[in-house]
């Protein structure tokens, strides 16, 4: 018969599951963030949604970011609050350290080890207490919501951009339609105020 897991083992499993949920939230919010940057590029270039999907859909994050920064510079928008928020978000989340590395767990923390091999071999580590990783996801979502407000994007515009891609999906008669997704960065007014207050302390304006 299999051994009954110890209380410590069950405690660790609980943390692993919670951390997986937190990382899932961060990844979903990152998808929302990239989509937001795509819409900003589309609007600056005056593209249709279909044209934007064709041009940007196959690009990784860094080229999209460079395109947006270059367009903003050409329009004299380098200091626009939206562009300042983009810089704060990238610095705060540091997605690569969470995705392109390996993780370890302890009773109190989760760590992410990122290896870089360029001119020299460098290893860096980020550590979080378990509650801090949850907080990272919540603050990230609030910052993306702030970015959309600064860009003047409505939920209808965001959903319309998504649906312009979803309309190309081929579905059988039995396949359910893809629901219009609600962004992970939607909170009640009171929740947003609390999270933004925390974000202001963690990611101060420069």
Image (cartoon, rainbow, N blue to C red):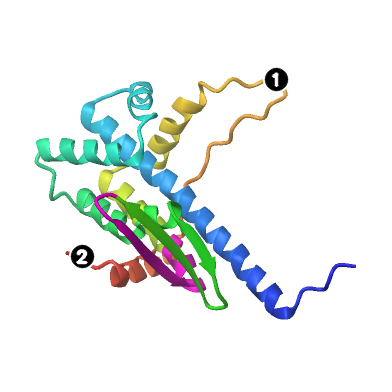
Q: In which quarter of the image is the N terminus?
A: bottom right
- Depicted 104 relative to depicted 29: above or below: below
Q: In which quarter of the image is residue 112?
A: bottom left
Could one spot residue 58 in this view of the protein?
A: yes
**Which residue in the protein does label 1 denote?**
173
Q: Quadrant of residue 98?
A: bottom left
- Mark 2 nearby-residue class (10 Å; few <14, some 14–19, many ≥20): few
| Foreground residue among 110 and 114 | 114
Dot 1 falls on a residue whose secondary structure is loop
Separation of residues labelled 2 and 1 (CA atoms) = 51 Å
Residue at x 49% of width, y 66% of height? 134
Residue at x 48% of width, y 48% of height? 28
Q: Quadrant of the C terminus?
A: bottom left
Residue 136 magenta-highlighted: yes
Q: Are marks 2 and 1 in contact (CB under 8 Å)?
A: no
| Foreground residue among 38 and 159 | 38
Furthest-right residue in this view: 1
Q: In this view, does 180 lie to the left or right of 191?
A: right
**Which residue in the protein does label 2 denote?**
205
| Foreground residue among 165 and 157 | 165
- Mark 1 nearby-residue class (10 Å; few <14, some 14–19, many ≥20): few
Give the x, y percent position of residue 203.
28, 66
- Depicted 79 relative to depicted 50: above or below: below
Q: Is residue 166 left or right of residue 115?
A: right
Residue 94 magenta-highlighted: no
Q: What stretch is highlighted in magenta?
A: 118-137
Q: Is residue 159 left or right of residue 120?
A: right
Give the x, y percent position of residue 6.
75, 78
- Depicted 115 relative to depicted 37: above or below: below
Q: Earlier in the sequence, mark 2 or mark 1?
A: 1
Image mark for residue 197: none
Give the x, y percent position of residue 177.
62, 29
């Amino acid at each position: 018969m299999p051994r009954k897991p110890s209380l410590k083992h069950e405690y660790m499993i609980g943390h692993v599951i919670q951390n997986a949920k937190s990382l899932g939230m961060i990844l979903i919010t990152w998808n929302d963030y990239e989509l937001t940057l795509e819409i900003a590029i589309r609007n600056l270039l005056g593209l249709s949604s279909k044209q934007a999907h064709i041009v940007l859909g196959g690009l990784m994050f860094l080229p999209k970011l460079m395109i947006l920064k270059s367009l903003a510079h050409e329009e004299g928008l380098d200091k626009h609050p939206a562009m300042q928020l983009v810089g704060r978000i990238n610095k705060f989340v540091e997605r690569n350290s969470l995705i392109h590395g390996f993780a370890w767990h302890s009773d109190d923390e989760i760590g992410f080890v990122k290896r870089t091999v360029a001119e020299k071999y460098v290893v860096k580590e980020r550590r979080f207490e378990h509650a801090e990783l949850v907080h990272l996801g919540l603050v990230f979502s609030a910052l993306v919501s702030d970015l959309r407000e600064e860009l003047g994007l409505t939920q209808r515009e965001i959903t319309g951009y998504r649906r312009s891609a979803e309309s190309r999906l081929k579905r059988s008669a039995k396949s359910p339609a893809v629901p219009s997704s609600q962004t992970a960065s939607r909170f009640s007014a009171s929740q947003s105020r609390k999270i933004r207050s925390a974000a202001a302390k963690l990611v101060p304006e420069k």
